[in-house]
Image: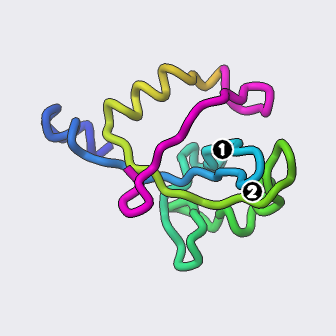
Amino acid sequence: TMLDRVDSKVADSVHTAFAVIRCLTCNYVEFPGCSAHKQLLCVRKDSGHAKCGTCPTATSNSSPWNSGCRLCKGATSVLFLNMTTPETEFALKAFPSFARGSTEDAVRTNLLVCSHCGA
């Protein structure tokens, strides 16, 4: 990846943007990703939805994201978060892949996001 070729001090300051879907009713948060390309949806469409950088998979046209919240079926909004490489690595360690992937793995937490920059 690009970050493999970057000095570690620089990599610590590189931010990666990715989509998050938040339920407006129950506050369930989901990190949508492309199963074909094994990556988070990180391209912002003009409509505000997120899509895969390689194929048409998007929050606006792919199930289950275009059907509302997985838990309560309420309306959702798409946010874009920015994280540094160390923050992303910490999140992946805190929520390893074997513990993700079903609604039973939901964790109640607070999400503070700057409405201007997504940090």
- Tell me: 14 left or right of 56: left
Q: Residue at x 38, y 63 (%)?
A: 116
Contact check, label 2 and label 1, Cβ < 8 Å: yes
Callout 2 crowding tier (Cα within 10 Å): few <14, some 14–19, many ≥20: some
| Above or below: residue 7 compared with residue 94 | below
The residue positioned 25% from the left and 46% from the top of the image is 14
Q: Position of residue 105 (x, y in %)?
A: 73, 26
- Front-lying residue, 70 or 56: 70
Task: Return the residue nearer the eye: 44 or 115.
Answer: 115
Q: Residue 49 — which label? A: none
Write down the region rendered in magenta. Answer: 99-119
Principal secondary structure, stretch drawn in magenta: loop
Q: Residue furthest bottom?
A: 46
Instruction: Give SS at disc 1.
Output: strand
Helix or strand or loop: what does disc 2 sit on?
helix
Which amino acid lies under the numbered mark 2 shown in the image of this protein?
Trp
Any mark on residue 65, and which? 2
Which residue in the structure is indicated by mark 1? 30
Q: Of the residues shown, which amino acid type is indicated by label 1?
A: Glu
Residue 53: image x %, image y %?
A: 50, 61
